[in-house]
Image: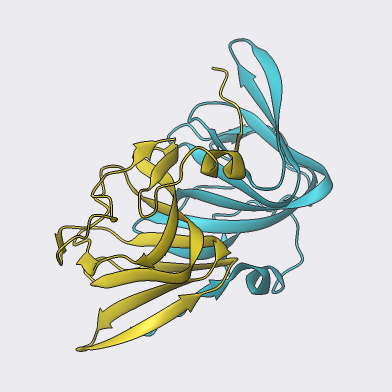
Chain colours: A yellow, B cyan
């Protein structure tokens, strides 16, 4: 084997698309994905998996439908949050952000159920960097 | 549920011990762990799992025993690396570093086989932040 470390900034420089996660690394049957985000994603739910968010730059908001209501958590740069499985959520970022995700390989970017997907949101299980 | 985002720097401020990983979050049956590191860890191997490293501050070196030889990969701040299952490895950091790890819950810090463990290396499956 001759795998080398990957510089995250260099990986970010290889793409411009927003809401289009890139697979940075694999850990067993999980992906480490990175994404550039700006504006609103869609309400969606992953029925069978939690989803981990780390904000590397900018600020991310995540709307959550819980306990019959909605709330929004705000993730500044350098913070993390896990959306539990089965919870409808909608990520957004007014000013734009760079995020890192951990989730099982094959997890669809818009979950198992979702609202209508606008053209600027990529429906994907992640692209190779 | 009322979980809130976790600021990584705030979590780091809650402990001083080196080579003593803290569990920052759970993602299904995986842990996101953070650790302060300085000096040398021990040669060890995780037979059944890959291990993901992200360097948040400082620089980390990882010695790897592969293909009958040894090599060292160097991870500057902002870079990632996955040590494949079954590969003996030894993390170290001359100047000290802060790292984030992603691995299955229950993974022992010194792996399934390891050399003698000095007192400054914590043998643990991770402590709660």
Identify the residue at image location x=41%, y=52%. Answer: A102
Q: Quadrant of residue B2?
A: bottom left
Identify the residue at image location x=35%, y=60%. Answer: A51
Specify the farthest residue to the top.
Answer: B68
Most foreground residue, A4 or B32: A4
Inspect this view and state whether residue A96 appears.
yes
Q: How many marks?
A: 0
Q: Quadrant of the C terminus of chain B?
A: bottom right
- B14 sits to left or right of A48: right
Residue A33: x and y, percent?
42, 47
- B36 sits to left or right of A32: right
Residue B50: x and y, percent?
47, 36
Identify the residue at image location x=53%, y=44%. Answer: A12
- A122 sits to left or right of A33: left
Q: Is residue A74 above or below residue B100?
A: below
Inspect this view and state whether residue B3 appears.
no
Residue B116: x and y, percent?
73, 36
Q: Is residue B34 above or below residue B53?
A: below
Q: Quadrant of residue B62?
A: top right
Residue B49: x and y, percent?
44, 37
Identify the residue at image location x=57%, y=18%. Answer: A2
Most foreground residue, B42 or A88: A88
Most foreground residue, A27 or A37: A37
Q: Quadrant of the N terminus of chain B?
A: bottom left
Q: Is residue A47 above or below residue A4?
A: below
Q: Is residue A104 above or below residue B13?
A: above
Most foreground residue, B80 or A95: A95
């Amino acid at each position: 084997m001759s795998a080398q470390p990957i510089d995250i900034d260099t990986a970010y420089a290889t793409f411009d698309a927003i809401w289009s996660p890139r697979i940075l690394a694999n850990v067993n049957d999980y992906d480490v994905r990175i994404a550039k985000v700006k504006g609103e994603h869609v309400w969606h739910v992953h029925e069978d998996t939690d989803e981990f968010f780390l904000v590397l730059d900018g600020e991310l908001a995540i709307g959550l439908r819980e306990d019959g209501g909605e709330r929004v958590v705000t993730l500044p740069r350098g913070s993390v949050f896990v959306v539990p499985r089965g919870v409808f959520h909608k990520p957004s970022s007014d000013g734009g952000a760079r995020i890192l995700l951990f989730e099982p390989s094959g997890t669809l970017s818009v979950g198992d159920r979702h609202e209508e997907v606008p053209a600027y949101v990529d429906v994907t299980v992640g692209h190779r960097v």
